[in-house]
Image (spheres, rainbow, N blue to C red):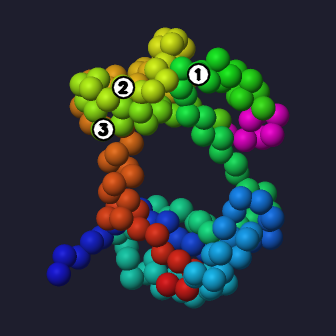
Amino acid sequence: MIMVKPKYIRLDASTVCQLKCPSCPTAKGVTAKALGSHFLLFTNFKQLVGKNPFISKIELSNWGEISSLPILRWQFVAFGHNEHEIPIAKKMAHDLNMIFGVKLDAGDMLSTNNKNPSFSPIKNKKAISKETGLGVASRNDYYKKFKELYRQRSICSQLWTQPQINADG
């Protein structure tokens, strides 16, 4: 048996939420049916931390909302047909006290050589390169610059590096 010792975990402190977001599975009762309605007990939190000293970072909350003022993040996926809307979306996010970020589209997600181009390629590569903060405007450009697939390391390795732990353990 392989012993996994993640440095980072996502810990669901609650599967209960007071918000009524219309598209949220927790607000619709789906989460409660699948996971139950729980709050993480402080004694269980202390026990988890005490028995796992290799964990250096814990992200709290996933299915529930443990605070009354959530931090909302607007993830804008840039395509050629919508890239001109970034300034408007950025202003809307600012007005709504949201964190705003531009993400590269997935059109060429598994390609490292332009064989699977995006269905709506970026028109202003310089602007998108600046908006992403990465200095690239496509996943192909990302691969060429960083020699790895865009966001694949963090997504595919989460099971081992950032496991999700629900409130009831």
The N terminus: image quadrant: bottom left
Q: Secondary structure at mark 3?
A: loop
Mark 2–mark 1 CB contact (< 8 Å) = no
Instruction: Please report whichever mark, 2 or 3, sits nearer to the chain's N-terminal start.
Output: 3
Residue type (three-letter) at the residue carrying disc 1:
His
Q: Is residue 45 above or below residue 59?
A: below
Q: Residue at x 43, y 36 (%)?
A: 106
Q: Which residue is mark 1?
A: 81
Verify whether residue 94 appears in magenta.
yes
Provide residue 94's location: percent of width, then percent of height: 76, 33
Q: Which residue is mark 3?
A: 110
Q: From the viewer's perspective, tell me whether residue 23 is left or right of residue 135.
A: right
Front residue of this view, candidates 154 and 7: 154
Front residue of this view, candidates 43 and 91: 91
Provide residue 111's location: percent of width, then percent of height: 28, 32
Q: Which residue is mark 2?
A: 117
Q: Secondary structure at mark 2?
A: loop
So how many labels did they put on this image?
3
Q: Which mark is residue 120?
A: none
For disc 3, the neighbor class at 10 Å (few under 14, some 14 to 19, many from 20) is some
Instruction: Please report whichever mark, 2 or 1, sits nearer to the chain's N-terminal start.
Output: 1
Q: From the viewer's perspective, tell me whether residue 50 is left or right of residue 72.
A: left
For disc 1, the neighbor class at 10 Å (few under 14, some 14 to 19, many from 20) is few
- Quadrant in the picture for residue 83: top right
- Cα distance in 3D space between marks 2 and 1: 14 Å
Q: Secondary structure at mark 1?
A: loop
Q: Residue furthest front?
A: 119
Provide residue 49's location: percent of width, then percent of height: 46, 77
Q: Is residue 108 above or below residue 8?
A: above
